[in-house]
Image (cartoon, helix red, strand yellow):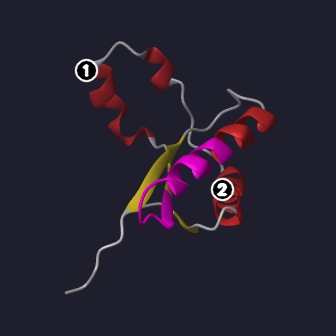
Amino acid sequence: MRKVRPVYRSVQLGGNKHSRRTAGHRRRKVSRFAKTLNGVNKIDILPYNRGGLEKSVRLSDNFELMQTETPSDETMEGIAETFRRHGFEVKIGG
């Protein structure tokens, strides 16, 4: 029987809501948290997409979500590199 390894999946939001320093600090915190999860050595980072926007608008009045952007490829690669430096195998996208 093949052993299944858990994968940590993290949705990434775009835009300039936080400074680069703050964003880097948050990524390091997520990395440290993921290290505490038993057996997790892979992280999938998922760029936010607006595909579910219509449904979320029907279900919520959270208009801040409607203004959220998809992160750039450069941003996603920077996020992936942070996780790699912490020893994770990283996949961008699902």
When the figure is inspected, residue 42 is found, relative to residue 28, above or below; the finding is below
Residue drawn at 56 percent across, 42 percent down? 70
Q: Amino acid at mark 2?
A: Asp
* Rendering coords of residue 23 (x, y %): 70, 37
At a point 42% along the width and 66% down the height, the residue shown is 39
Residue 35, picture quadrant: bottom right
Q: What label does residue 73 carry, if any? A: 2
Position of residue 81 measured from the top left corner of the image (x, y, whole percent):
70, 61
- State the residue in front, 58 or 29: 29
Q: Is residue 42 left or right of residue 31?
A: left
Residue 57 falls within the magenta-colored stretch: no
User: How many labels, in total?
Assistant: 2
* The disc label shown at residue 50, or none: none
In the image, the segment drawn in magenta is 28-44
Measured as percent of width and height from the top left, residue 5 is found at 35, 71
Residue at point 65% right, 38% down? 26
Q: Secondary structure at mark 1?
A: helix
Tell me the quarter of the image containing the N terminus. Answer: bottom left
Q: Give the left or right position of residue 59, taking residue 62 as reference.
A: left
Residue farthest top in this picture = 61
Q: Secondary structure at mark 2?
A: helix
Nearer the observer, 56 or 82: 82
Q: From the image, tell me which residue sits under label 1.
A: 59
Amino acid type, residue under disc 1 in the picture = Leu
